[in-house]
Amino acid sequence: MKTNINQERDFKASEYFVVVGLIVLCIFLTIISKGVFLSGTNVTNVLLQTTINSIVAIGMTVVILTGGIDLSVGSIVGLTGIFSGMLFQKMGFADTLLNAILCIVGGICIGLACGCINGLLISKAKLPAFIATLGTMSIARGFALAITGGRPITSVPFLTKFIGNGQIGFIKMPIIIMIVAYAIAWWMLRHTRLGRNIYATGGNIESARLSGINVNKTLLATYTISGFTAALSGIIYIGRMATAQTTAGEGYEMDAIAAVVIGGASMTGGQGRILGTLIGALFITVIKNGLSLLNVNTHIQQIVTGLVIVFAVMSDTLRKQNN
Amino acid sequence: MAAGNLLKMEDISMDFPGVKALDKVHFELNSGEVHMLMGENGAGKSTLMKILCGVHKKSSGNIYYKGEAVEIENVHKAQEMGINIIYQELNLIPYLSVAENIFVGRIPKKGIGIDWKSMYEQTQKILDDMQLELNPRTPVRKLSVAQQQMVEVAKAVSRKVDLLIMDEPTSSLTDKEIDGLFFIIDRLKKRGVGIIYISHRLEELLEIGDRATVLRDGQYIETFPLKKDMNLDVLIKAMIGRDLTEQYPKMEIPVGEELLRVENITTDKVKNCSFSVRSGEIVGFAGLMGAGRTELMRALTGADPRQSGDIYLRGKKIVIKTFQDAVKNKIGFLTEDRKGQGLVLVLDVKQNITLAALRKIIDKGVLSLKKEKAAARKMVDAIRIKTPGLSQKTVNLSGGNQQKVVLAKWLYAGCDVIIFDEPTRGIDVGAKVEIYKLMIEQARNGSAVIMVSSELPEVIGMSDRVVVMSNGVITGELSRADAAQDKIMKLAMGGNYR
């Protein structure tokens, strides 16, 4: 039993690795910015900036846990917003509660449909996830451009604005949604059959199949979840901006993958935790925020972000090898 | 060309980490001779041939080729010396033409381009010489397996070839195609090429072989001159004659009623296979590699699709289309590749045990980790899995304990038809006995046990009944009293020699 205790301890230490990194980074930024970093407004800002990426990253985590990848999430964010905005436009911008709900639900449905198509292409048509989602990435973006002619839709329903900018008590809505979404994802992965099937499928798809798990159904559900979380982010995005833009969400797939990877999930599947992803997403925002506070030019920010991703994953890999 | 000594291998030993694959093996070959290399799976035939073609490096021993001591460092060197091999699996490039495949790696050039004309002409000459009616320009993927095999031969003989190794060249050919191959072998013989021929099919032995050398467990046993009317029993004895040193804790268990019956299962690998297993019975499936035993089990559990065949459980016909159906019907399958197809190595012991029966630990839609722990604990104790804890990742367990975890998975799922495919492969002797005991325990609890095994002593030591397969068909069934090694071996080799 002794080995077991050590094992568990090692495991937890690796979980805290990113957390410790994040805390050290925050302390460093607090000192160097003379306290500005920890001010109420800045903390809220960081959390708000994290919400969209971190919610997209929930779906990405689930997908990566099955050993796949979803490159289409950024385009789904964009298409969801545009579709929702188009609906509103077709309603003549009549801002009633019913219309607002229809716009939101319609947007989400588009996201679900995209995810579902990804899932079918990957599980039934046996396309590699990279190729299938590369295709839908282009198709979804193309649709967003085609239905609007590339023009933004400059009005969104009040409810959407509330989702993007409102607050309950002193907490902003997107932050509440993020927390709830993470709680549900955590519970789903740990306490449902789907969650276990996702880990098993990613760990070894053949063993999972030969244990009686319906791996096709699992993959389908996984990509649909990813479509859903991307759509949710899409709604939050247009709510925050009060405008639906065709270019919304460009490059978000990369930020989401980065969050998942910094969070410690294995790209080959079967290993990783949803809370790790949340930390990873926060990590990325904190770096960007910190560099802004320090007045580092945005071009340099990109370089630093890239270096941090490489460094974080590299040190994690090296540490695992040494174990 | 007069028959002279072409090759002499002396005291060849080969050590793989932890295993002595070859132990002072002798082998000789004359020019213009067909020398059959015989032995069971794992006897060391392939290893010996790989040393000869420079794929493996021998640990010790001497090789004399054309009277000179040689070192064969790599494949290239072997080819330069005129040693060529045709592997069992074809190594052709499907989208290239016959000519391109024959000349791959040494395509004739004109300037910086390819000299197509010369290549096609040379190919045509080779094909004519072999009396093969093939167009040099045809893409290889459009040829039948037999024709592709002939292209392999053409490829080998188009090079400088003095020694040709053929590893089970007829395993995928029909009788007529085999005749064609033998015709070419005959011509090569007359040209003075020495041929080493590995085959499991006894009927071929006397037809084309001049001599046969038998290996067993990595050791040289004997070399036999072959005569048309000789009795092959001596050869079979030489191939299998090891002592039964291992212990089999076999027990007499009263056999109950029929649990599983399969009728006429046919896939692209097996043909019309029917058999049944009773409660309390252990049925062994014997056969040589590629006989179709694993394929039959995969077809009956729905792991692979089948063309036809019915499955009955307790006399009632059941539908098995996907593997999920097998699990629903409580048929468990311990695959031969436990790491690749049995366990999810990154998951821990308890998660692997409950994998096939998650519904049992779900409480009102919620997966109960407490129930899971209790269930896993019970299984670990019941079948004595040695693990530091339930949260241990299965990748860290020994082979024997990994196998037990897979068994625990099926027992927890309540399976009473349990298929073990090569259950003791890669497991040390002590753990093997543990696995045997567990198999017997299952039979005693009324389960029907199927054991596919390539280890004859294991099959004989453990089975109540032995079903033998060869080339995708069931060639015979032997009772425990009847199941002697030589009888099984005859059936496994096709059963139809004299």
Image: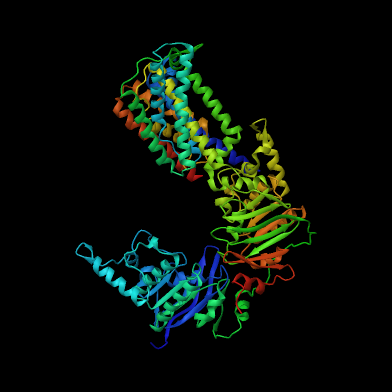
Q: Quadrant of residue B155?
A: bottom left
Q: Position of residue B244 (x, y in %)?
A: 68, 70
In this rendering, does residue B133 appear at all?
A: yes
Is B353 rendered above or below residue B478? above
Instruction: Please state which of residues A246 and B27 is positioned toward the viewer in this rendering.
Output: A246
Q: Position of residue A120 (x, y in %)?
A: 48, 38
Instruction: Please state which of residues B307 and A223 is positioned toward the viewer in this rendering.
Output: B307
Instruction: Please state which of residues B284 and B151 is positioned toward the viewer in this rendering.
Output: B151
Residue at left offset 43%, top offset 36%: A70
In this rendering, does residue B385 appear at all?
A: no
Q: Position of residue B421 (x, y in %)?
A: 62, 57
Residue at left offset 58%, top offset 51%: B303
Residue lying furthest bottom: B2
- Whether residue A180 sits left or right of residue B377 in the image: it is left
Task: Give the colour scheme shown.
Answer: rainbow
Q: Position of residue A229 (x, y in %)?
A: 47, 28
- Whether residue B273 sits left or right of residue B64 in the image: it is right
Is A212 rendered above or below residue A98? below
Residue lying furthest right: B254
Marker count (numbered): 0
Q: Quadrant of residue B458?
A: bottom right
Q: Quadrant of the N terminus of chain A?
A: top right
